[in-house]
Image: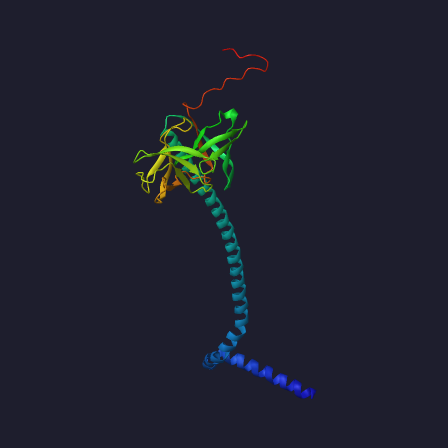
Amino acid sequence: MGPALHLKIFLLVLISVVLMTVDQRFTALQQVRYYLQYVVAPLREAVAQPERAFAWLGTELSSHQRLIQQNAALRQENLLLQARQQKFDSISEENARLRRLLNASERNSARVKIARLLSVDLDPYTQRIVINQGKTDGAYLGQPVIDANGLLGQVIQVGPFSSEVLLISDPGSAVPVIDVRSGLRLLAVGTGQSDSLGLRSAPNTADIRVGDQIVTSGLGGRFPPDYPVCRIASIGRTPGDPFAQVSCRPVAALGRHREVLLIWNAAQHSPVKPSAPAGKAAKP
């Protein structure tokens, strides 16, 4: 068994040496080597495929991981840009509101001042807001308040640094008004709804139409004249009823703005003299 194995090895070595010598010195085996490549090439491809597969898989995993990281970074950047855009939109809208308020103040000669809303109470029974202007800022009872579109209400309570404003939509509010087209004098009263007012004292046969503009008349001296209040939305006439049922839509954005304008009505506001101390008669 042993000698036969050694003999086989010797013969194989001898054959290898002979073949290498023949291949080195003669060209007889070049044709054989050429045809053997057809057999070896598939085996070589099969051996290289696992390495290529591992290399491709590593590249794909690396690219996928990089894409995930880039996608996460882009999402974060998008969120930041959206937050900045929201802030930009908010600032732009605030600037637009302030410009409208300033334009409204330029249209009248009275002294005005911008005030910010601190709180809003739009309960059906109490349509009121609180602003950041009080007695130290010159606010006074009965002071008219407007926005960029028209009349909002009047100050009913003044504190040192804030004031309470009764909106024209409050059921306790009543504003003397006039129909611009016909000149009919009416009374605009609150209904408890921010999008509706009632018009009193309109005769059943009065010359009023849907769409008529209603402005302050100036009667009573509380509100200066010619400030827009509302536009007539509907008219109901019942036979036998002396008055028509008229409703209108306020032009001011009741409870929807963060800034309003205080008006110093010279005809209504005057310094209040301090009362005499108790026990002493006031001098004439």
Q: Residue placed farthest to the front in the image?
A: 240
Task: Place residue 11 in its image quadrant.
Answer: bottom right
* Residue 239 coordinates in the image, percent (x, y): 34, 45
Q: Is residue 186 left or right of residue 157?
A: left
Examine the rendering and report whether any part of residue 39 can be seen: yes
* The N terminus: image quadrant: bottom right
Compared to 11, does 130 lie above or below?
A: above
Q: Residue placed farthest to the right in the image?
A: 2
* Residue 212 coordinates in the image, percent (x, y): 32, 39
Task: Place residue 182 in its image quadrant.
Answer: top left
Compared to 58, does 72 lie above or below?
A: above
Q: Residue at x 63, y 86 (%)?
A: 8
Of residues 14 and 224, the one nearer the viewer is 224
Task: Place residue 96 in its image quadrant.
Answer: top left
Examine the rendering and report whether any part of residue 24 can be seen: no
Q: Residue placed farthest to the top in the image?
A: 283
Q: Is residue 59 left or right of residue 185?
A: right
* Residue 154 coordinates in the image, percent (x, y): 46, 31
Q: Residue at x 46, y 45 (%)?
A: 85
Compared to 269, does 240 lie above or below?
A: below
* Residue 247 coordinates in the image, percent (x, y): 39, 42
Of residues 88 and 24, the one nearer the viewer is 88
Of residues 75 and 21, the one nearer the viewer is 75
Of residues 229 and 258, the one nearer the viewer is 229
